[in-house]
Amino acid sequence: MARLPSAERRRQLTEAAIRAMTRDGVPRTTTRSIAAEAGVSLSVFHYCFESKQELLESVITTITGHYVTLVREAIRPRETLRETVRAGFQAYWDHVSAHPGEHMLTYELTQYALREPGFEHLARRQYEMYCVTYADLIERLRHSMGFELTVPVPVLARYLAAMTDGLTLNYLVLGSDTTWTDILDTITDHVAGLVREEVRP
């Protein structure tokens, strides 16, 4: 087995955990099954992660990072603010429809953390991370396109986190439906209506 830097081995084990948990569910995924998924010994797992809490935190952070990377690349400024916002939503939605199991895992992680004594803070951290992520994206877009918000950034960030969370769960329950495009358009119009475009000198 090739020796890898600790950070790379942690990344490998985290991705393996995501695959295993997506396939088998959080409660049924063990440290042994994650090590097997990654093709390493159990001792390597315990060298990289001191506890299951540490692993789950890495899983939550990594999954969120997957979404952020996609949206950040898609949300580059376009001709209009609406087009820019719609592209960001579409990038996220394409990931939801292509990887429903991974998104289902995010809800399972939340429920698991809330029900497991001592893990509750992970659920809070997960949702705080969503808000921080949206706030960062809003600020980047606001500065690059030059507009002012009619609501505080933290309010809009939490609204977007709650809205996408609920919309994703609806999709996981109801499945594919042509009305999702209309819903995304409606949400885009609403969000675009919460900003006040600013003309740069």
Image (tube, rainbow, N blue to C red):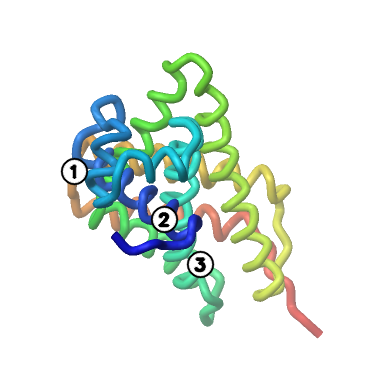
Q: Position of residue 138 (x, y in %)?
A: 62, 59
Disc assigned to residue 9: 2
- The disc label shown at residue 154, or none: none
Instruction: Report which residue position mark 1 lands on.
Output: 175
User: Which residue is at a point 68% across and 62% down the rendered structure image?
Assistant: 139
Nearer-N-terminus badge (1/3): 3
- Towards the viewer: 41 or 186: 41
Q: Amino acid at mark 2?
A: Arg
Q: CA distance from mark 2 to mark 3?
A: 26 Å
Q: Residue at x 52, y 31 (%)?
A: 122
- The tag earlier along the polypeptide, 1 or 2, is 2
**Left or right: 138 with respect to 110?**
right
Closer to the chain start, of discs 2 and 3, is: 2
- Distance of mark 1 from mark 2, alpha carbons? 36 Å
How many marks on residues?
3
Quadrant containing the N terminus is bottom left
Local secondary structure at mark 1: loop
Please identify, in this view, whether the residue under mark 1 or under mark 2 is nearer the observer.
2
Answer yes or no: is residue 191 visible.
yes
* Image coords of residue 174 (percent x, y): 20, 38
- Label number found at residue 72: 3
Looking at the image, residue 188 lies above or below residue 143:
above
Q: Quadrant of residue 9?
A: bottom left
Q: Is 76 in front, or is 115?
A: 115
Amino acid type at mark 1:
Gly
State which mark lies toward you, 2 or 3.
2
Crowding at label 2, few (<14), some or many (≥20) Cα neighbours within 10 Å?
some
Q: Looking at the picture, does residue 27 appear above or below residue 106?
A: above
Horizontal side of residue 127 vs 103, given as left or right: right
Name the residue type under label 3: Arg
Q: Position of residue 33 (x, y in %)?
A: 24, 37
Residue occupying the point 59% across, 44% down = 131
